[in-house]
Image: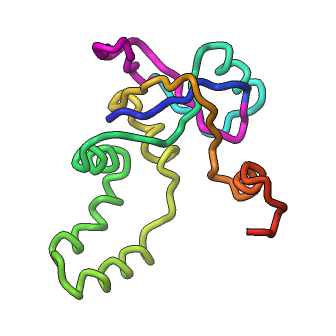
Amino acid sequence: MVILGIEPTHAETQYGWVEPGGERARASDGAVAFAVRRFWEKPARAQAQMLLRSGALWNSFVMVGWVDAFVALVAEALPGLVAAFAPVWRAGTSTHETTVLRQIYHRIPAVGFSDAVLARVPDRLAALRATGFTWTDLGDPQRTLAYLDLPLGAA
């Protein structure tokens, strides 16, 4: 699996960061995929400044991989979560599937994918450095409204 890492412009503390390791692969156009050494989720100011200086990347959360690879990643990090969905696979595609899914979602805990999965298995990922464009993380409603130049409460 490959995650797109954004070249940072400042020491942002509200974004996740990807700390790249050694080179994993090089494409014919010169693009380099790096091993992922570590994920940092919303680091403190001093950590964000250190990450910026060290060449770490913002975590765009844009990932490419086979569905089986995503499931395997979650299974390695959170085996109980994947096991909780076994009844869905047994139900198949039927009207019963929706009922089973509702029951599962009421039982399972809420988890953050970055913290609970990606941070636990960074050795299973590669990062591709994205450069040459402007990017912002729209995961925060206030940041999204500011990006759209809308006053808070207008959306």
Tell me the quadrant of the picture where the N terminus can be found.
top left
Question: Which is nearer the eye, 32 or 131?
Answer: 131
Colour theme: rainbow
Magenta stretch, residue numbers: 12-36
For residue 139, above or below residue 5: below
For residue 81, above or below residue 87: above
Is residue 30 highlighted in magenta?
A: yes
Residue at the image point whose x is 48% and y is 65% from the top? 109
| Location of residue 130 in the rendering, given as x and y in whole percent from the top left corner | 50, 26
For residue 87, above or below residue 44: below
Residue 95 found in image quarter: bottom left
What secondary structure prevails in the magenta region? Answer: strand
Question: Which is nearer the eye, 127 or 46?
Answer: 127
- Taking the view exactly as shown, the residue that stands out farthest to the right is 151
Tell me the quadrant of the picture where the C terminus can be found.
bottom right
Question: Which is nearer the eye, 98 or 141?
Answer: 141
Residue 41 found in image quarter: top right
Residue at the image point whose x is 64% and y is 25% from the top? 8
Question: For this view, does 82 lie left or right of residue 9?
Answer: left
| Location of residue 5 in the rendering, given as x and y in whole percent from the top left corner | 50, 29
Is residue 39 highlighted in magenta?
A: no
Residue at the image point whose x is 47% and y is 50% from the top? 113
Residue at the image point whose x is 64% and y is 50% from the top? 138
| Location of residue 147 in the rendering, given as x and y in whole percent from the top left corner | 73, 49
